[in-house]
Amino acid sequence: MSNRKREIFHLLFQRTREVSKGMNEVLQDHELYMAQWSILFFLHTYGETSQSEISSYLNVEAPTVTRTLVRMEKSGWIARKEGKDKRERIVYLTEEAKEKFPHVANDVQKIEKQWFAHFSAEEKEQLYQLLMKLENN
């Protein structure tokens, strides 16, 4: 195996860290972190859902998601209610979050444009497809 192929994980990790750091800097103005943004984006896109579905979507352990949701609930971004049984918790965006979401999303889109300014439309699509292939592993 060539050195280049062995470096893929290392390079992917480095770029992921750079993206996370940049996103956290942008989201700081909204008093959010990237993990919280991921939850907001998910809820905005798919609507109210269970905590376990959020955990599954993010590939994060349930206790980690619960801690993040508690913080988000305290800061007014989300609310939770009982589900069909007492063990299930349904999560949804508050009205305040729905009003703020477009402003946060706009800032996220700005940084995405900066990161991908040197990519052609075809390269962006290729990157998307390659990342989707990773999801199937």
Image: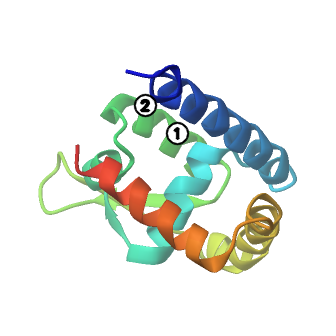
Where residue 102 sits: x, y (%)?
72, 79
Circle 1/circle 2 CB separation < 8 Å: yes
Q: Residue at x 68, y 40 (%)?
A: 20
With 66 as the anchor, is 97 left or right in this view? right
Pick the residue in front: 98 or 135: 135
The N terminus lies in quadrant: top left
Pick the residue in front: 110 or 64: 110
The residue at which mark 2 appears reads as 64
The residue at which mark 1 appears reads as 68
* Residue type, mark 2 in image: Thr
Pick the residue in front: 60 or 17: 17
Where residue 121 sits: x, y (%)?
63, 78
Where residue 87 sits: x, y (%)?
17, 45
Figure disc tally: 2
Q: Residue at x 17, y 50 (%)?
A: 86
Which residue is most to the left? 85
In the displayed structure, 131 sits above or below 96; it is: above
Which residue is most to the front? 2
